Image (cartoon, rainbow, N blue to C red):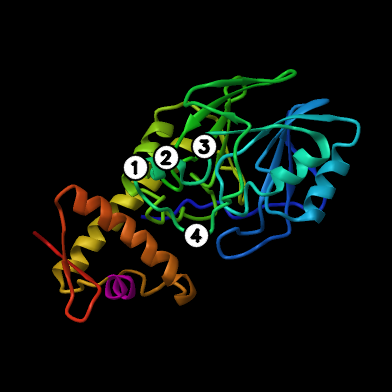
Amino acid sequence: MSAPFVREIAFDYGVMAEVAPGIRRLVAKNPGPFTYTGTGTYVIGRGEVAVVDAGPRDEAHVAALLEALRGERITHQLITHTHLDHSPAAALVKQATGAPTWAFAAHGEARAEEGVAVEEGGDFDFRPDRRVKDGEEIVGAGWRVRAIHTPGHTSNHLCFALEETGDLFTGDHVMGWSTTVVSPPDGDMAAYMASLEKLLAREDRVLWPTHGPPVRETKPFLAYLIRHREAREAAILSAIAEGHGAIPDMVASIYRDVDKRLHAAAARSVLAHLVKLAREGRVAREDAPGGGTLYRLP
């Protein structure tokens, strides 16, 4: 399958730009292998506005955001999820403006209720001022957003839809420049694939990821992401059949053409697939001699 990734993005750090009618974006200067060019903070509306994903705890980014919105009022902070590059700046924005936060839940809260301890790397200080349910409408001055619960990347992940215009803010659930990391235990591959199907059934016109450029061929791109995950599962099953029972061996085989610096993240994604496959009874786990886990076909 040829990947229909979109990687070209035009912006200047510290400068807020209008990217579509009623939508502005300011990119934080935190580029990296998982953030691409940096966290894109979106602003919806004019005058009384909503901020989507205020970003990392970066005072320069927050100062640029507040300066760009001088003379306007932030009435809502919408948080797609609580990784450290998305939600921590919301506390600084709230301190400066009083703007409350709207999110599904605290980091890992849904999995914690299931007795699952979530991974490090989340914004454990974040608590939403308003908890948002799947399908709930959030209304501001001249704009209306619908929240769509899309667990998978994290259990509390939301997308936010401007349904009147067909614009969907996808956080890290869908990124045009790359596939999404799904890392257990808070990340859940079965939930992620179901959430992709959920978006595929919608009629959104443009997807606006927090990292990278927008996706305009929405349905073909979402269909590709689903096929890609299905192909990855097939590759994992094939690797196990060839005798690669340990995750590092699977990664070395499946991702042989991928930069080795990304193999650790690939291993988390492989684990997420294996958790799903084990739950479905398509692979079995056993303890390896000397420790560790081996996987085999049942």
Q: Can you tell which mark lies on residue 114?
A: 1
In the rendered structure, are the residues bearing label 2 and label 1 in contact, judged by CB atoms less than 8 Å apart? yes
In what quadrant of the picture does the N terminus appear? Answer: bottom left
Q: Can you tell which mark lies on residue 110?
A: 2
> Magenta residues, as a range?
247-253
**Residue with the mark numbered 3:** 105
In the rendered structure, are the residues bearing label 2 and label 4 in contact, judged by CB atoms less than 8 Å apart? no
Q: CA distance from mark 2 to mark 4?
A: 15 Å
Q: Position of residue 77 (x, y in %)?
A: 68, 34
Q: CA distance from mark 3 to mark 2?
A: 7 Å
**Residue with the mark numbered 4:** 120
Is disc 4 surrounded by few (<14), some (14 to 19) or many (20+) residues within 10 Å?
Answer: few
Is disc 2 surrounded by few (<14), some (14 to 19) or many (20+) residues within 10 Å?
Answer: some
Q: Is residue 40 left or right of residue 251?
A: right
Q: Earlier in the sequence, mark 1 or mark 3?
A: 3
Is disc 3 surrounded by few (<14), some (14 to 19) or many (20+) residues within 10 Å?
Answer: many
